[in-house]
Image (cartoon, rainbow, N blue to C red):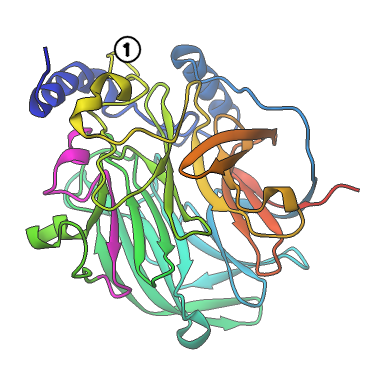
Amino acid sequence: MTRSLPALLSALLLGACAGAADGDTEPAARAGATGDAAVATEAAMQAATGRADQPADGHPFRVEPVAQLDEPWAMAFLPDGRLLVTEKRGRLRLVDPASGGVGSVEGVPDVDYGGQGGFGDVALHPRFADNATVYLSYAEAGEGDTRGAAVARAGLVLDGDGGRLSDLEVIYRQVPKTTGRGHYAHRLLFGPDGHLWISNGERQHFDPAQDMGANLGKIVRLNDDGSVPADNPFAEQGGVAAQVWSLGHRNPLGIAFDDNGQLWNVEMGPAGGDELNRVVRGGNYGYPVVSNGDHYDGTVIPDHGSAADTGFIAPAISWTPVISPSSLLFYSGTDFPDWQGDALIGGLSSRALVRVEFDGDGAREAARYDMGQRIRGVAQAPDGRLYLIEDGQGGRLLRLLPPG
């Protein structure tokens, strides 16, 4: 018997909300665990949900540590080769990869730190060389015990090995603010057409991912000032629905365009079912009605194959056991010519750099490189060099170099 979308959704929520709403977090990140506590938490999660590390042997690169940071979350390269790095507790760092020097940029907004929340992503305006404008995402406190992600833009004023932000202005907020401290996602990306793309997690509340009255569980497309492009797929609905490009996402922690201008995302599934998705205009990716994983409390979620008549879009790749994807980059450098056009994904519980090859609209995991640490971010410098940041306290900025 075919069940309607509302019936499926209600059944899943009733079975899952009792045990999963506040515990459905990244391995080793729940309650902000770090150090030995994080390792113990991650091991327990893997045993309970089948999240197991399965790294591939072989490293076709050398790893060169550059600098050490405190809970780094995201990075963006400046035209001069230095890079901005956000630290989750609420600091913005200016790092010189040539010297390893780490300075500070003052004037960042207050962040609501805890769980998965805090300072998030950083991105440069496409005309940064002319306007020196940067964009920042972060967890923002609301009324009572609520919070949500916000995105602000500001001018970047550099002074020696540091700097400051000026004229900071909030241009976007997740709606509604909710309880809990998970699944903000809040990745930022400027596309080839100059629009600002923002990924939004469903904040561990499941149903907002299908609710067009919320921008949670959605990827949104905005103008650079936060206004809504008139040609967005749901623009005629008004409100936050007008911001939406795609829906049915769980915790999309990586968004990137390939060389053909196609948008892709990676997102965490629940217990199993991490996803790489080809993101299309108005597409619905099904969460929480369908997923190739199940809820942490054991409640079964119908997989994409069993719900083919719903119109939901199945992932190009799904992973069980999961990789816990943190970030996404399409590689275009020359150090590793065989990787050109491939996607590189940072892995948290997998402690890996995952490489994906493409054939038309299809994709497959080509290699998994064991990095020995949770990988939070992947970025390419203006000179084509490839950099990673490790997760957690003492997380390092790493440079990957050709072997030999």
Asked where in the image residue 368 lies, by quadrant, the reply is top right
Whether residue 156 appears in this view of the structure is: no
Amino acid residing under circle 1: Gly
Q: In this image, 353 relative to 289: left or right?
A: right
Seen in the picture, residue 312 relative to 92 is either above or below; the reply is: above
Q: Nearer the viewer, residue 230 or 14?
A: 230
Image: magenta residue range: 206-226
Whether residue 321 appears in this view of the structure is: yes
Count of numbered badges drawn on the protein: 1
Residue 293 in the image, given as x and y percentages of width and height:
37, 22
Residue 388 in the image, given as x and y percentages of width and height:
64, 50
Q: Would you name the residue on which mark 1 appears?
A: 298
Residue pushed farthest right? 404
Q: Secondary structure at mark 1?
A: loop
Q: Residue at x 32, y 50 (%)?
A: 280
**208 is within the stretch colored magenta:** yes
Q: In this image, 276 relative to 365: left or right?
A: left
Residue 129 in the image, given as x and y percentages of width and height:
53, 84
Q: Residue at x 57, y 53 (%)?
A: 330
